Amino acid sequence: MNILNKKFNTPFNTAPFSKIKNSHFLPAFKHAIEEAKSEINFIVKNSEKPTFENTIEALDYSGEQLDRISSIFFNLNSAETNETIQKIAQKVSPLLSEFSNDITLNEQLFKRVKVVYDAKKDLKLTKEQATLLDKKYKSFSRNGANLPDGKKIKLREIDKQLSQLKLKFGENVLAETNKFEMLITDETDLSGLPEGAMEAAKQLAESKDKNGWLFTLDYPSYIPFMTYADNRELRKKISFAAGAKAFQGDKLDNQKNVLDIAKLRFERANLLGYKTHAHFVLEERMAETPEKVKKFLNELLDKAKPAAEREFKGLEEFAKNLDNIEQLEKWDGAYYSEKLKKKLFSLDDELLKPYFKLENVINGAFTVAHKLFDLNFEEIHNIDKYHQDVLTYKVTDANGDLVSIFYADFFPRTGKRNGAWMTSYKPQYVKNNKNNRPHVSIVCNFTKPTKSKPSLLTFNEVTTLFHEFGHALHGMLANTTYPSLSGTSVYWDFVELPSQILENWCYEKEALGIFAKHYKTGEVIPMDLVKKIKASATFHEGMQTLRQISFGLLDISWHGKNPTKISDVKAHEVAVFKNTSLYPETKETCMSTSFSHIFQGGYSSGYYSYKWAEVLDADAFEYFKESGVFNKTVATKFKENVLSKGGTENPMTLYKRFRGQAPKPDALLRRAGLIKN
């Protein structure tokens, strides 16, 4: 029998990666879909009157095995993919889309759900049950249950197309990332690069039987080159390669995919009675409407733009004085910013990296979680991994009870998409009085160890690790009854709060003292470096804020209005960026064609949420700082009112219960140095 269709006989019910063959997936999906259909059929055919238990609750617990197989498969498609898996994904995605439609467009099932929903005032439901009922009803009403038959057929067609287009978009971006290689054979072209970056490039070249130094678009290769390489022409070359991903008019081009995805999303929203895709999405977000999102972003823009323009002017003057650069270009930004930062603060990543050995930073994150939330992490070696680089941990509470299984996957490789993310292989939920604990994973692309050095992180990589670990804590500490409300199953403009707030500890001496230790001597990071990290925290914050705002505005431009008249992806993008761009435009590059967050991931109409959540996290962290960053009372309130509650209540209700008040944007503006204390 197919291993994916039976109960896993593994420690902690973990995924049996080593026993799963690619050939298992498609038949396993088909079997699990049929199984889930029979569970739905059982609910529909129930002769008893619809109740919360026999309809809403039964619906939420249905399809457990299908969800499990999906999480294993699609996580592998992101972190350890290959051509075979990608082909399977193209076959599986329409099947899952069709099955999802089979549920939401099932008239008899919707009738039962509606009976319960209409009687909700008399049902004496808990807050979590009331939320689940509301969510289940909306999952039908917002996804076509009230449509006439002809429009239901059309909706199915659109969803099938979208599922395939999004996969194709991601495959093209990954193929473009893997395709580019820049081999350097003249050592003088490496001028400015740190020793570690050169050693990593040499090692990469050797691994591919090449002589010289090999650089790619993987972040640990690309970022150091853009930051330190003195050769301006080579910086331009690799910058163009990164900016032109899936924008080269060849078989990997994503321009048509972008237009098709945007137009199909718009058509789908119209079909369901919404003005745009953003109106559809934001109905279930804290921000509520695209108009509010635009207002929020433009108000931030008003505050950030003057600072960004001042910073850019200063950077231009610095580059002119240093190297007689007449026109600062995109491929100059990171290079001269790093030099200016070093001049202003006597600080750069190369000075800090020896204090941020990966293993120490991981243990530091664990210690912070222990001090705040009483969690204990123990590396274990008796569970399966999907790649030898993956680390596995058992997470327990103060009583020694299992909280979670935790996977950590830190280094780039061919089958892994760029960036960093948190995901899960199994959700937390309570069934038959048993609290099923989650299996959570974080995936990053950090600098690999070399022959002479361990993995030493840049400070940006340190904050990235803490960010994803914050998401992981949200998943690990979940304590809800229903799987669809558990962990990170919250409004997407709230989901970034746990991740972004944890980044704050990277700037605090009490936390840095725990893990920032020199990899050779064990010396704790000197206080003067800690002060410089704090002082430099707002360096070029105006420019960084402007950049994030521009991404949010681009997202809303694709999804917050009718995109059917857009025929030129690049021209559209240039028009959107007109008010936020500082550097000269380059006709060879385009962001939309590799903007995976919104065209492949779940951030369509939601990219603003990073800045939205920053308002929450800055306000929340001020509360921590009032009582000490490791204050147990505040940490417990955060754990009990935010981290453990998932999507069981409205996020603003949860936030106010933790904070005692609504968030104020002043804390963010103060932290960013955009207003004075």
Image (cartoon, rainbow, N blue to C red):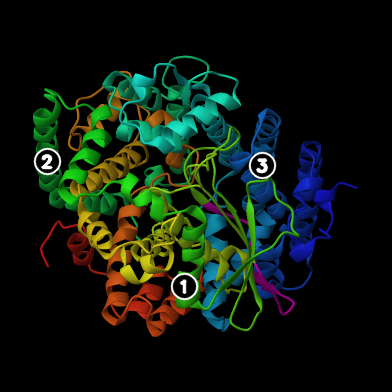
Instruction: Residue under label 1, please give it.
Output: 649
Does residue 8 appear anywhere in the picture? yes
Nearer to us in this view, 201 or 675: 201
Q: Can residue 426 be seen? A: no
Residue bearing the label numbered 2: 309
Question: Could you tell me which residue is drawn at 23 percent across and 24 percent down?
Answer: 585
Of 100 and 499, nearer the camera is 499
Q: Say the numbered circle drawn on residue 98.
A: 3
Residue 429 among magenta residues: yes
How many residues crowd around disc 3 within 10 Å: few (fewer than 14), some, or many (20 or more)? some
Residue 323 pos. (x, y %): 14, 26
Q: Secondary structure at mark 2?
A: helix
**Disc on the earlier residue, 3 or 2:** 3
Which SS type dominates the magenta stretch? strand
Q: Nearer the viewer, mark 1 or mark 3?
A: 1
Residue 185, picture quadrant: top left
Left or right for 538, reference 469: left
- Please name the amino acid that badge 1 sits on: Glu
Distance (Cα) linking label 2 and label 1: 41 Å
Q: Nearer the viewer, mark 2 or mark 1?
A: 2
Q: Position of residue 351 (x, y in %)?
A: 32, 48
* Residue type for callout 3: Glu
Q: Gap in Å between the C-alphas at discs 1 and 3?
A: 30 Å
- From the image, state whether disc 3 or disc 2 is nearer to you: 2
- Label 2: few (<14), some (14–19) or many (≥20) C-alpha neighbours in 10 Å: some
